[in-house]
Image (spheres, rainbow, N blue to C red):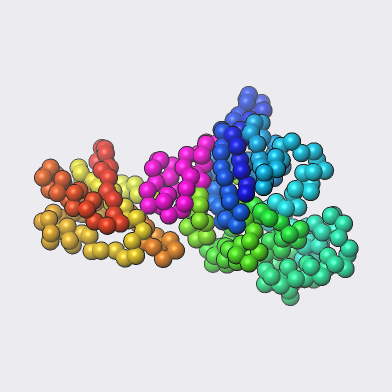
Amino acid sequence: MVELKHISKVFQTNDGDFQALKDVNLQIPDGEIYGIIGMSGAGKSTLVRCINMLERPTEGEVLINGQNLCTMNEAQLRAQRRSITMIFQQFNLLMQRTCLKNVCFPMEISGVRKADAAKRAMELLELVGLPDKANAYPAQLSGGQKQRVAIARALATDPKVLLCDEATSALDPNTTHAILQLISDINKRLGITAIIITHQMSVIEEICSHVAILDHGLVVEEGSVKEIFANPKTETAKRLVFPNSDVHPAQLKSNRVLRVVFNGGTSYEPLIASLAIDCGVKANILGAETKNVNGQAFGYMLLGLPDSSIDYSRALSYIRSRDGVSAEEVPDYAV
Ligand SMILES: Nc1ncnc2c1ncn2[C@@H]1O[C@H](COP(=O)(O)OP(=O)(O)OP(=O)(O)O)[C@@H](O)[C@H]1O
Ligand SMILES: [Mg+2]
């Protein structure tokens, strides 16, 4: 279990102190694929660097299986970092070394015999699907292949936790999907806890079971991905879950607007048609976005309703009576 307790981080800058993390508390159980999402500058990299003590928190504790990293000396931390490894957006491979030698590197540092390291490195390159690139140099690889080598290297010390800081942000969607599948596979096969830092909800959607949303150094929401998708509470979460839900009012004007949220049913009922037939209320779709998370439907629809209060109330109670659907008024929509 990775536990972050009251983590704060203050950077001293020329313009004075800057607080990048504010009392962050998280518990990440073993074997989880846990997402940390937030906009640029939210503090994600700072937080992940605090988890392996590349950055010392100003306040708080980082506990890995009950052991407090903040009180460890450098030698103890070096040992811990073998069990908490990291991959990055820019891969950070050693360009002068072959792929095999890159994967051998952390083992050489920790004193593994050369022949044993090479054997293990070869197994790891097979695990990530690149045995034929053992003698290639990083410059000869695609981005996705470089990240596979970086993953093999990160696994070389048999870690318990794999930290992934924007590991797919430099990759195209297909390669992103392949790398996420590899991380998911590693998580299942080796039982390694994966902590996925990203600014993309699609990444969280694809492989994470739990997610924390970071905004200006604060965790503003935390929970299962399904819960957060079904019912994002804060503005930050809503913006991340439904990034396109702001339709320009000038284009589609309506005085009474409802945001209808689908909370994970297995299929969509023809809501608009039923609303017209059962209630006689004609609604306009002002915007919509749907997602499929682990086979369940999530998403929202913005409905423009007639001005009449009776129609509006009728529509609201009708929608709320349906299973797997919730509705809330969008105030000041047409301002
Ligand atoms: N060493 C530092 N000194 C001063 N300020 C820093 C330092 N490192 C980070 N910060 C500040 O802390 C805030 C959070 O930075 P961080 O890199 O953690 O954000 P992030 O969420 O990873 O952003 P991105 O998505 O762009 O990678 C930023 O405002 C940044 O300027
Ligand atoms: Mg970052």
Q: Is residue 84 left or right of residue 169?
A: right
> Is residue 58 shown above or below 306?
above
Residue 117 shown left or right of residue 169 in the figure: right
Q: Residue extending furthest bottom?
A: 132
Report the quarter where the C terminus lies. Answer: top left
The reply to whether residue 137 is visible in this rendering is no
Q: Nearer the viewer, residue 260 or 242?
A: 260
- Residue 259's place in the image compared with 292, above or below, is above
Report the residue at 82% width, 43% height from top.
75
Q: Could you say which quadrant of the image residue 45 lies in? A: top right
Question: Which of these two is toward me, 91 or 141?
Answer: 91
Rendered residue at 57%/45% (across/down): 27
Residue 40, image quadrant: top right
Segment tinted magenta in the rendering:
212-241
Rendering coords of residue 91 (x, y %): 69, 56
Instruction: Residue 248 in the image: state x and y as whole percent.
Output: 31, 46
Magenta run includes residue 229: yes
Q: Residue furthest top?
A: 16
Q: Is residue 226 magenta?
A: yes
Relative to 283, residue 178 above or below: below
Q: Residue at x 58, y 60 (%)?
A: 171
Extreme residue in the front direction: 66
Q: Who's the residue at 17% across and 61% down the image? A: 274
Left or right: 135 as drawn, with respect to 58:
right
Q: Provide residue 47's location: percent of width, then percent of height.
A: 61, 41
From the top left corner, tell me how far across and down residue 280 is, in percent: 10, 56
The answer to whether one can see residue 77 in this image is yes
Q: Is residue 313 left or right of residue 87?
A: left
